[in-house]
């Protein structure tokens, strides 16, 4: 009788231990599932809101694999950012200026392109990943009712442009809801993504930008004093 009892107790303990181990999802593993989700997406569109040091912007972001990215802003109206894999173009409607910069895709690290397969791969390579407060979902904002899994990424070396990146991920869809990035100069950038539309067969021609003929062009602006 005692042997049967202890044998049953042992089996129950082993089963509970196995269940507990399978239920624990490390931050790195969860981050990998998010990366795999983005790797399976051919293209997406989403609404984007950007808060850069209390300057608020909003618009629509479009992405096509492997590295085409475009943001059409509603605020500031008519401002555009386009990256076609080789050339970064920014149109500023106020001064009617077109800023062009030839860059490698790996060096074009903005908060927006962190929500792409390439951006996630770079984060995995150059940042350590941890949960902010555990693997369970928490509210995105107090009383918002919107549940996300929060990850904190800390840079492994001082050469990265962002010291810390916080990701808020929709747990079921494995899509990034919010990116909070702190720069080396302690500036905070927040990127909110909502209303995703996946695999819409976005034409690559969308990433060809024809600036107004009256605009002034400035090439290699990142390296011009």
Image (cartoon, helix red, strand yellow):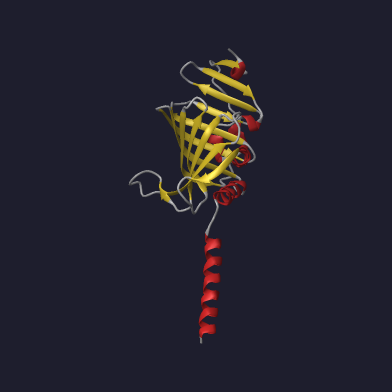
Residue 109 at x, y percent in the picture: 58, 31
Report whether residue 112 is seen.
yes
Number of numbered discs present?
0
Furthest-left residue in this view: 143
Furthest-top residue in this view: 225
Residue 91 at x, y percent in the picture: 53, 23
Q: Quadrant of the C terminus?
A: top right
At 60% from the left and 26% from the top, the residue drawn is 88
At 55% from the left and 44% from the top, the residue drawn is 129
Image-based side of 60 in relation to 40, left or right: left
Q: Dividing the picture into quarters, in which one does residue 216 lie?
A: top right
At 61% from the left and 45% from the top, the residue drawn is 42
Relative to 42, is 109 above or below? above
Residue 79 at x, y percent in the picture: 49, 25
Report whether residue 111 is seen.
no
Residue 121 at x, y percent in the picture: 62, 41
Q: Dividing the picture into quarters, in which one does residue 52 lie?
A: top left
Relative to 95, is 145 above or below? below
Q: Nearer the viewer, residue 222 or 72?
A: 222
At 59% from the left and 29% from the top, the residue drawn is 158
Furthest-front residue in this view: 2
Q: Dividing the picture into quarters, in which one does residue 103 lie?
A: top right
Relative to 33, is 220 above or below? above
């Amino acid at each position: 009788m005692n042997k049967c009892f202890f044998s049953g107790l042992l089996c129950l303990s082993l089963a509970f231990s196995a269940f507990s181990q399978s239920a624990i999802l490390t931050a790195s593993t969860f981050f990998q599932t998010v990366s795999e989700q983005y790797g399976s997406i051919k293209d997406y569109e989403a609404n984007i809101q950007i808060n850069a040091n209390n300057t608020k912007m909003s618009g629509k972001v479009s992405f096509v694999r492997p590295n085409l990215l475009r943001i059409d802003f509603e605020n500031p109206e008519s401002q555009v950012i386009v990256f076609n894999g080789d050339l970064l173009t920014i149109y500023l409607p106020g001064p009617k200026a077109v800023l062009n910069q030839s860059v490698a895709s790996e060096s074009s690290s903005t908060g927006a392109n962190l929500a792409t397969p390439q951006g996630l791969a770079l984060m995995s390579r150059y940042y350590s990943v941890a949960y902010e407060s555990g693997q369970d979902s928490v509210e995105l904002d107090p009383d918002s009712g919107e549940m996300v899994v929060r990850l904190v990424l800390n840079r492994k070396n001082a050469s990265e442009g962002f010291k810390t990146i916080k990701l808020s991920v929709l747990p079921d869809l494995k899509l990034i809801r919010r990116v909070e990035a702190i720069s080396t100069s302690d500036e905070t950038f927040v990127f909110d993504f909502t209303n995703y539309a996946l695999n819409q067969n976005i034409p690559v021609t969308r990433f060809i930008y024809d600036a107004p003929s009256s605009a002034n062009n400035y090439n290699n602006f990142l390296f011009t004093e």
